[in-house]
Image: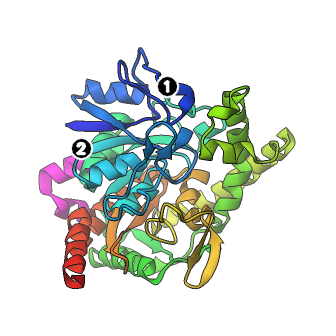
Amino acid sequence: MPVTVKDTFETAGLRTTFGSRLFAEHVPAHDAEAVARLRESGAVIIGKTNAAELALDYTADNMVFGRTNNPFDFERTPGGSSGGCAAAVAACLTAASLGSDLVGSLRIPAHFCGVASFRPTAFGERASVGHLPPFEPPFSRGASAGAIARTVEDVILLDSVLGEGVAASRVREQLEKGGLEVVERGLRVVRAAFYMFDGATQVTKETRASVEVAARALDAVGMNVSEETPPHVGRATELWLALFSSATREFVGRLYAGREELAGRAARAVLERPLPATEDAQDEAWRTRDALRAELLRWLEETPVIVCPVGAVPALRHDAGRKIEVEGREMGAFRAFSYAQAFNVFDLPAVCVPVGVSPEGLPLGVQVAGHPEALDKVFAAALIVEEASGGWRGVAENLSKAAESSV
């Protein structure tokens, strides 16, 4: 399989810049562990994909290579920080791409570009050596490596290679033996919840409609589906900032110390933040997170599959700035993706599935997420949603029809 690799993973003999001028000519001697696993399984690395500087924001724009455009609208970003991955997959330049995700960086680009992606859990699930920012505490409690591909089945295939792959292998066996019908049978009477408002972030009506399409698809195969918001997901942005922003500030500060003139827009924005929180404040934030996560996991034992938006809006314009408008309300662009951030904060597996189209002619994805020990059900539910919506092909066909009708 020909694949590309996000430029935050080291690739032996192939320039790896991490989107930073500090590493503009860096050529690693060794592969990152995740890249090595791909090669060992027969993948052919055909190139690197652009990313935000040090994976710091929701773009694929840096001072080394410039910006990557969304294949559906060149005035818009493909998202980030794995934006180049999603753009390359959506444009059929590669079968799949290896990316990473600490704050929605796999699912937001997939949502923006109309393709599929999977953010696995962080604990013990993924090779971490050879990535920058490093997958070490506290980042290791929310960050993971994962795949972007055009179909959920391809994402599952890549997951069976990159991680422990037990759930992925189980679902693949079901597909090989009996196709989607066998997968459906395993979901009957399983409880699922869907929500379109996390208590903090409003979403567009088309986004709500996409979530409803996904929920109806699960209901149609016999799942016990209800509209219900899981506990604490509305605190995602607040918690993410408390848990990870200080560590990000420290990491960027150390890296650019004495070389601040090489920092690009994203790194400068981080360097301008106040000094990190105290160690006591960090410890308290993690205690709070752990207590809330325990409550959420107990809730998920009864309802192991959940469906929700990826974010409040489709692909942002390159010049969107820090504030955007949703249904007549202004909000911060970072908060607009609280739905994706929740699954990093609480470390839950989540698949992005392309489902709908916005009035602007842009793809819309939804998240299918759930309990870490019910990953086979999460994968199965994502396959059902994809089948009902047509996946990336369905989105592309709808966009083509919309374009023709507007001419």
Tell me which label, 1 or 2, sits earlier in the chain.
2
Give the x, y percent position of residue 371. Answer: 49, 56
Name the one closer to the observer, 260 or 385: 260
Q: Which residue is mark 1?
A: 129
Residue 118 in sight here: yes
For the residue labelled by badge 2, is the local secondary structure a helix, a strand or a loop? loop
Locate residue 181: give its quadrant: bottom left
- Quick check: 18 above or below 187? above
- Residue denoted by label 2: 94
User: Is 231 located above or below residue 85 in the figure?
Assistant: below
Name the mark on residue 164. Answer: none
Spot occupied by residue 269 in the image (x, y as percentages of width and height): 68, 48
- Residue 179 counted in the magenta span: yes
Quarter of the image that includes the N terminus: top left
Q: At which x and y percent is residue 45?
A: 27, 31
Q: Is residue 386 left or right of residue 303?
A: left
- Front-most of 192 and 39? 39
Q: What colouring method underlies this structural image?
A: rainbow
Label 1 to label 2: alpha-carbon separation: 24 Å
| Closer to the camera in the image, 318 or 213 | 318
Range of the magenta residues? 171-184
Residue 406, quarter of the rendered image: bottom left
In the figure, 260 relative to 358: above or below?
Answer: above
Q: Position of residue 205 (x, y in %)?
A: 46, 83
**Amino acid type, mark 1:** Val
> With 112 as the anchor, is 289 left or right in this view?
right
Three-letter residue code for mark 2:
Thr
Q: Residues within 10 Å of mark 2 (few under 14, many from 20)?
A: many
At a point 42% along the width and 50% down the height, the residue shown is 83
Q: Measuring 45% from the left and 30% from the top, which residue is drawn there?
A: 127
